[in-house]
Image: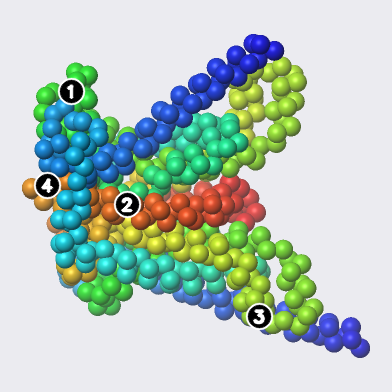
Amino acid sequence: MKTNIIKHIRDDFWFYIMVLITVMFVGFPLLWMALSSLKPSVELFKMPPQIFPKNPTLLWYKNTFSNSTVVRYFFNSFLVASSTMIIDMVIATLGAYSLARFSYRGRRFIMMTVLSAYCLPPIMLMIPLYRIIAALGLNSSYLGVIIGHVTFTFPFSVWLLIPFFQKVPKEMEEAAIVDGATSLKIFSAIMLPLCVPGILSTGIMAFILSWNEYLLSSVLIISDTMKTLTVGLANYISSTEIDWGAIMALGTATTLPIVIMFSAIQKYFVEGLTAGAVKG
Amino acid sequence: MERARLMGHKRDYHTQRQLLGIIFIIPTVLFLLVFVIYPVIYNVILSFTDARLMKPDFSFIAFDNYKKLFSNMRFLKYVKNTLIWTFFSVIGQLLLGLSIALLINKKKSGTGLRSFLLIPYVVPAVALALVTKWVTNGDYGIVSWWLNSLGLLEYRQSPLAVPGSAMAVLIIVNIWRSYPFPMLIYWATLKGIDKELYDAANVDGAGTFQTFWNITLPHLKNTTIVLAILRIVWTATYFDLIWLITGGGPAGTTTHLPIMIYQASFGTFQTGYASSISVVLGLFLFICVVFYVKKTIANDR
């Protein structure tokens, strides 16, 4: 009995040590970014570095956000990401419902194409998309980069959504048929409302992926006024004189909204992803 | 009568329903055709041409781009860099993901912890690249300072400026960014293992290690294969992190094929040549993808 308790305490001790190490490893870069953004220059460039700011300041944030270019970047990113999200949600909801609940010729092939498209990385699409978008004259409009973002987010969205539609019991559909409901009515009155959490969280995931995307955004946008945050931020690092405090503030401001959004939808995201992937 | 009416309604419903299913899939199919399948084919076509970045027209030059690629001495070096980057990143993220999954699976109240540990999945690569450059800054970076204190790095030097360690930094940062996906999938697989198996093993007096070896590991085999394929594809083609942290330097030691593609198309404007590199990379990955898709679709879905 006694040895059991000791074993338990010892197990717990190692468990928490491991958790602590993991949390420190994961938290360090983010914490360091946030802490650096609050330090005045003197502390930022002090050697040896000190962990916590002695005189925390919001100066970097004030400087960054009084710059109209930065505000513009935020606006552009928000516009591109929300448009991607909306287009994505419409196409993916219809597509996922069709793939999840219907059987017709070619369904399996479409499913395989969606899954292959999900594996297709942006670097493989970059060159042809650049030419197609330029040929369509869309490289000086937001639409070009939005199309680029939809190409890699929507296969993922379809894939995440399929299990949500599959989960709705067949009996509900059958009962509605007996009541004389049309198939469109069944979709709008039963399927859609039941899958709202899945659809919303998939949409937010698309928003996040679009917000974070760098390669296609940097290639498909020509005009300076339309550049997104990631592209703007990247230009700051490549400039010769790096203003570290301001960059850390901007980095934190870019990351924080995304982390908050992700925390809100995480439950559904985990549900959709694990349902789709575990069967491997 | 009533029954016949109902049957008739059901039949009508079924034709009408079939139609709806097909209408709903049309946007997906159109989008895939125009912006995914066509670009892939177009990319292959471009690889046989002398296309340049800003020029809409081009002419065919057969295999010239491929000949040029395979006679480029640096190509082999960049393939080697790609393999090193991919191999260590994938092994690292699978191992870390599995270890953390085993850890959070131990306690029932692991949800809060799991949420926290998923955060790197959504951290923008640009932000991560910025922090990496800041902490490895030669003059003021905390990691450079730590490494210097441990005697591993010269004073006022950045690990990104040293050929071998630049790649090591990139791989560690990439593992940090990408372990959450394997962690989640492993965690879900662990949840799916029948508890009775463990109880039976306990009764038989099997130790922790024996149980892990004989019960847990065999159940993770399929998951590991699928995860490894998927992550190989994504890691070998992942551009943002390396580009933003080292840009392929120092002296090309962290240049992998995606960076080579980017430099060929947007650095020297040789679109056709760049396409041929991405076809070569794509062919290798295509084999992986076919294997992955077959394995995933075969298991129901």
Secondary element at image label 3: helix
The label on residue B148 is 1
Q: Would residue B198 appear left or right of A220 to someone viewing this image? A: right
Question: Which of marks 4 and 3 precedes in the sequence?
Answer: 3
Whether pointer 3 and pointer 4 mark residues with C-beta atoms closer than 8 Å, the reply is: no
Callout 1: residue from which chain?
A: B
Percent x, y for residue A189? 65, 76
Q: Residues within 10 Å of mark 1 (few under 14, many from 20)?
A: some
Which residue has dot 3 on it? A185
Q: Amino acid at mark 4?
A: Ile
The label on residue A242 is 4
Whether pointer 3 and pointer 2 mark residues with C-beta atoms closer than 8 Å, the reply is: no
Question: Which of marks 2 and 3 precedes in the sequence?
Answer: 3
Callout 2: residue from which chain?
A: A
Q: Amino acid at mark 3?
A: Lys
Q: Amino acid at mark 2?
A: Thr
Percent x, y for residue B296? 57, 51
The Cα atoms of the two marked residues, 2 and 1, are separated by: 30 Å
Whether pointer 4 and pointer 1 mark residues with C-beta atoms closer than 8 Å, the reply is: no
**Residue A26 visible within the image:** yes
Vertical placement of residue A124 versus B106, above or below: below
Are the numbered discs 3 and 1 placed on the same chain, yes or no?
no
Percent x, y for residue A52? 25, 35
